[in-house]
C-alpha cells in the first residue's frame, strides 16, 4: 500500500521539508507542492499517515486506522509500503 497522493517526487520533497522543519501534524503535508487541504482530507481518511510518535501526546488529533510514522513510511519506499 502507498499513501494516496504521495508519489516519488512528493515523497522526496517531504523528506527535504522535514529536514528543515519536522511535520507536527498530518495537515502539515500542505507544505508539499500539490498537497492542499482536500488532498490532506483524503490522506487522513486513508488512515496510513500519521506524524512520528516523537510528537508529544495530546498535541494533535489521532488519525483513524493503524498509526504509522509518515516519515518512516516515506523513508522505506517513496511509492509503496507494506501493510
Image (spheres, grey):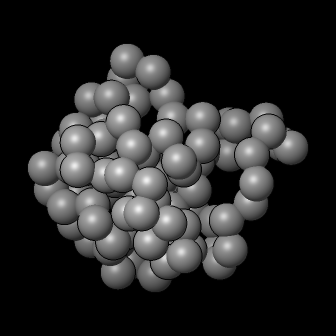
The answer, for residue 35, to whether it is visible in the render is yes
Against 61, residue 22 (above or below) is above
The residue at the far right in this view is 58
Determine the image quadrant of residue 57. Answer: top right
Question: Foreground: 3 or 54?
Answer: 3
- Residue at image location 13% in from the left, 49% down from the top: 9
Against 60, residue 67 (above or below) is below
- Residue at image location 37% in from the left, 18% down from the top: 20
The residue at the far left in this view is 9
- Residue at image location 44% in from the left, 72% down from the top: 42
Q: Return the x and y of residue 30 as percentages of the image width and height.
A: 39, 43
Q: Return the x and y of residue 13 as percentages of the image width and height.
A: 22, 38
Left or right: 31, with 58 as reference point: left
Against 39, residue 53 (above or below) is above
Which quadrant is the N terminus positioned in?
bottom left
- Residue at image location 50% in from the left, 66% down from the top: 41
Against 24, residue 9 (above or below) is below
Left or right: 73, with 10 as reference point: right
Q: Please tell me how many numbered marks the rendered image carries.
A: 0
Q: Return the x and y of residue 83 as percentages of the image width and height.
A: 46, 81
Left or right: 60, with 3 as reference point: right
The answer, for residue 72, to whether it is visible in the render is no
Amino acid at each position: 500500500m502507498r499513501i494516496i497522493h504521495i508519489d516519488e517526487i512528493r515523497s522526496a520533497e517531504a523528506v527535504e521539508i522535514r529536514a528543515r522543519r519536522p511535520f507536527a501534524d498530518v495537515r502539515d503535508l500542505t507544505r508539499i507542492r500539490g498537497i492542499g487541504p482536500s488532498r490532506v482530507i483524503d490522506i487522513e481518511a486513508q488512515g496510513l499517515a500519521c506524524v512520528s510518535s516523537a510528537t508529544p501526546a495530546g498535541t494533535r488529533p489521532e488519525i483513524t486506522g493503524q498509526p504509522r510514522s509518515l516519515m518512516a513510511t516515506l523513508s522505506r519506499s517513496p511509492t509503496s509500503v507494506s501493510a
